[in-house]
Amino acid sequence: MREKKRIVVVEDEPDIAEIVREYLERDGFSVEVAGTVTGALDALQRGTPDALLLDITLPDGSGLDVLRAAALPEARVPTIMLTARADEADRIIGLELGADDYVTKPFSPREVLARVRSLLRRTGETAAATAGKPTRKTRIAELEIDHDFHELSIAGKTASLTATEFKILALLAENPGEVFTRSHLLDRLGDDGAIYERTLDRHINNLRKKIEKDPRNPEYVLTVYGTGYKMRRS
Ligand code: CA
């Protein structure tokens, strides 16, 4: 049997910490909760976890301090920040410090679980690619997305996407039904430095022209008015 993946949850609000713990444990993860910066650093000292869920506002300091320690190249920990809406500046610093993702409070534990799975898939991918494991694919209706070879086929026919279009599609498809705001999409895609808010909609339009039967009435990449985009569920 495979060893359980260990996740450290740093969160000082006991109700939030416990419900996140419950969801992750139910999904087969081993969970350790810390409520302070000191506690978090202790937990990291005991061994590098497979993932870190990190609240930013902690009683004895900032989660960013934990991130500074956890993001050291020699001890890189896949990290999702748990942030309040008002923490935008911290969130940006956190992403710059190497956090992989964030969820904004109030969040549903289901969303956190989905993000953790997605993060572990992504971090596992690098290892899998070198180990020659089978390729990972997502299927949504007629779309088949091959994440390892960056290929898309529609009803069995290969479609040609730009790198950015593929990234947008893959990100949405890995989290079907989940709404991505424009700024969240940009955060997740922006590491290329080539995507700006004004061009994001254009990439989405181009993507739709390639994957939708009727790009003006999309069936896959749906607009959530005033918010952003989401992929249909199945
Ligand atoms: Ca807090």
Image (cartoon, helix red, strand yellow):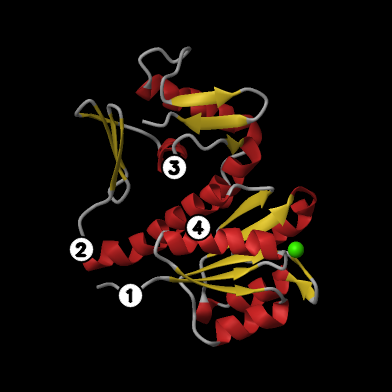
Circle count: 4
Dot 2 corresponds to which residue? 132
Q: Which of the pair 202/172 is nearer the observer? A: 172
Q: Which of the pair 164/7 is nearer the observer? A: 7
Which numbered disc flags the more N-terminal residue, 4 or 2? 4
- Residue 60: percent from left, percent from top: 80, 77
Dot 1 corresponds to which residue? 3
- Residue 84: percent from left, percent from top: 74, 52
Q: Which mark is residue 23?
A: 4
The CA distance from mark 1 to mark 4 is 18 Å
Q: Secondary structure at mark 4?
A: helix
- Between circles 1 and 4, the one closer to the viewer is 4
The CA distance from mark 2 to mark 1 is 21 Å
Image quarter in which the N terminus is found: bottom left
Amino acid type at circle 3 is Lys
Residue 128's place in the image compared with 87, above or below, is below
Q: Residues within 10 Å of mark 4 (few under 14, many from 20)?
A: some
On whether ligand 1 comes within 8 Å of the CB at mark 3, the answer is no
Which numbered disc flags the more N-terminal residue, 1 or 3? 1
Q: From the viewer's perspective, tell me whether residue 145 is left or right of residue 79.
A: left
Q: From the viewer's perspective, tell me whether residue 190 is left or right of residue 131.
A: right
- Between circles 1 and 3, the one closer to the viewer is 1
Residue 82's place in the image compared with 67, above or below, is above
Q: Taking the image as drawn, is residue 71 in sight? A: no
Q: What residue sits 59% from the left and 58% below the top?
A: 19
Dot 3 corresponds to which residue? 167
Amino acid type at circle 1 is Glu
Which numbered disc flags the more N-terminal residue, 1 or 4? 1
Q: Taking the image as drawn, is residue 198 in sight? A: yes
